[in-house]
Image (cartoon, rainbow, N blue to C red):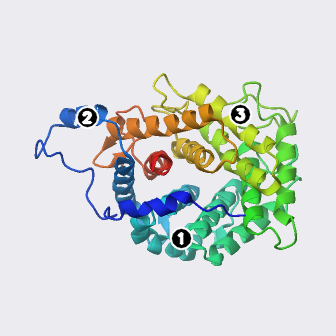
């Protein structure tokens, strides 16, 4: 089933906010206040839902300066552009009138042009995780447009990974077609994509086709040992021993699986999937945030590559999904998720924003600004907007 978004009915209150507006709003106290005055004002007042929408609009306007209609990509980044599309669709889900002036063009343009722009027909390349990022993007676009063309594309992409699931050295899915890695990201993406397709195409191509894939991916993941004793997820498996490699705990590996598990509860009525999602999410917040509740990647502030610059937003996006959509959420857990989203969104805008450009280190200040840092930060700002309306 597809759950409706109650927040959609409230989005009308924001219809006066335009994607083309220049934001943030100027203060009536001074026509050109100093940066220290602006920072003080931001830190000394509580952000409102309208503020978060304003921040998102401003950040999206900036991000669109990096979009190429001819390639359908942002800064020619491949899997990262799939995550930008997902973030835009999340914003449209709750605030359609603010998003659609951008997305009405971007979604069909990217669907048509990105395979040629990236050189990967059908969104198929040498990496199963890249493919599944695109599948998730088009599922989310289907959710907000109800255009089955997007869902059909997601299903087509999924088949490439499905055709080889279980053939990796340690079971599950290889990360790449060169068979160099077998671990968390690709298998979490497989589970989550299958779970989402199961709730949108429960009878197609046959009854329970996608749910069966989600269940076997879930069972493999639990048996793999990738979830460590701290209830966080390590990145990979040792191909010689098929044991957890005890390597880095990336923020995105804590996030990818969360919405898939929640959707498995929708499909089955079994709350154990929700419980697992909340266990991973709360452990990750405890492990990866600082004393102010701000999320950090271990490579910060100076050693993150373009992939790692994308990671934190993926976690934030999935926390918002649990906050808004999980069927069973204890009050203290719900409060934890809301505080996480607002604390990080507030810190980004107060400390890590200059001229609507959003950096890598959300505690700021940070001169590293790319389409990856921009869209990653926007994920949590959009999450705060969606969670507080």
Q: Earlier along the polypeptide chain: callout 3 or callout 1?
A: 1
Would residue 258 be visible to someone looking at this image? Answer: yes
Q: Residue at x 81, y 73 (%)?
A: 204
Q: Is residue 220 above or below residue 243?
A: below
**Who's the residue at 69% across and 48% down the image?**
327
Name the residue that disc number 3 marks. Answer: 279
Q: Secondary structure at mark 1?
A: helix
Q: Is 104 left, or right, of 39 in this rendering? A: right
Tell me the crowding category of disc 1: few under 14, some 14 to 19, or many 20 or more residues within 10 angstroms, Cα based: some
Q: Earlier in the sequence, mark 2 or mark 3?
A: 2
Q: Secondary structure at mark 2?
A: helix
**Residue drawn at (32%, 61%) of the image:** 17
Residue 366 screen position, x and y as percent: 37, 36
How far apart are labels 1 and 2 at the CA level? 40 Å
Front residue of this view, candidates 145 and 130: 145
Residue at mark 2: 39
Front residue of 62/338: it is 338
């Amino acid at each position: 089933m597809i759950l409706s978004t109650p927040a959609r009915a409230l989005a009308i209150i924001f219809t006066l906010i335009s994607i083309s507006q220049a934001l943030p709003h100027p203060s009536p106290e001074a026509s050109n206040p100093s940066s220290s005055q602006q920072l003080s004002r931001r830190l000394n007042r509580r952000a409102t839902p309208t503020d978060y929408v304003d921040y998102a609009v401003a950040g999206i306007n900036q991000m669109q300066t990096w979009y190429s209609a001819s390639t359908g990509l942002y800064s020619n980044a491949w899997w990262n552009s799939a995550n930008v599309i997902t973030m835009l669709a999340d914003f449209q889900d709750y605030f359609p009138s603010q998003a659609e002036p951008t997305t009405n063009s971007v979604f069909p343009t990217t669907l048509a042009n990105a395979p040629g722009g990236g050189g990967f027909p059908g969104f198929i390349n040498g990496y199963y995780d890249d493919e599944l990022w695109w599948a998730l993007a088009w599922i989310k676009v289907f959710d907000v447009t109800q255009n089955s063309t997007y869902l059909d594309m997601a299903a087509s992409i999924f088949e490439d990974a499905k055709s080889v699931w279980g053939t990796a050295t340690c079971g599950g899915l290889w990360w790449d077609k060169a068979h160099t890695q077998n671990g968390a990201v690709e298998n979490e993406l497989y589970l989550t994509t299958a779970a989402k397709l199961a709730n949108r195409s429960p009878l197609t191509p046959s009854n329970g086709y996608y749910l069966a894939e989600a269940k076997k991916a879930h069972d493999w993941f639990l048996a793999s040992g990738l979830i460590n004793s701290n209830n966080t997820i390590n990145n990979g498996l040792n191909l010689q021993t098929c044991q957890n490699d005890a390597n880095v705990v990336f923020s995105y590996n804590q996030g990818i699986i969360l919405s898939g598990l929640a959707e498995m509860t929708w499909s089955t009525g079994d709350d154990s999937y929700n419980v697992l999602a909340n266990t991973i999410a709360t452990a990750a917040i405890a492990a990866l945030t600082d004393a102010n509740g701000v999320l950090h990647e271990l490579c910060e502030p100076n050693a993150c590559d373009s992939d790692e610059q994308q990671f934190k937003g993926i976690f934030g996006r999935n926390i918002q999904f649990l906050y808004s959509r999980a069927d069973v959420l204890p009050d203290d857990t719900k409060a934890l998720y809301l505080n996480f989203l607002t604390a990080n969104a507030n810190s980004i805008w107060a400390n890590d924003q200059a001229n609507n450009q959003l950096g890598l280190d959300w505690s700021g200040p940070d001169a590293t600004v790319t389409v990856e840092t921009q869209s990653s930060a926007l994920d949590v700002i959009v999450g705060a907007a969606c969670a507080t309306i």
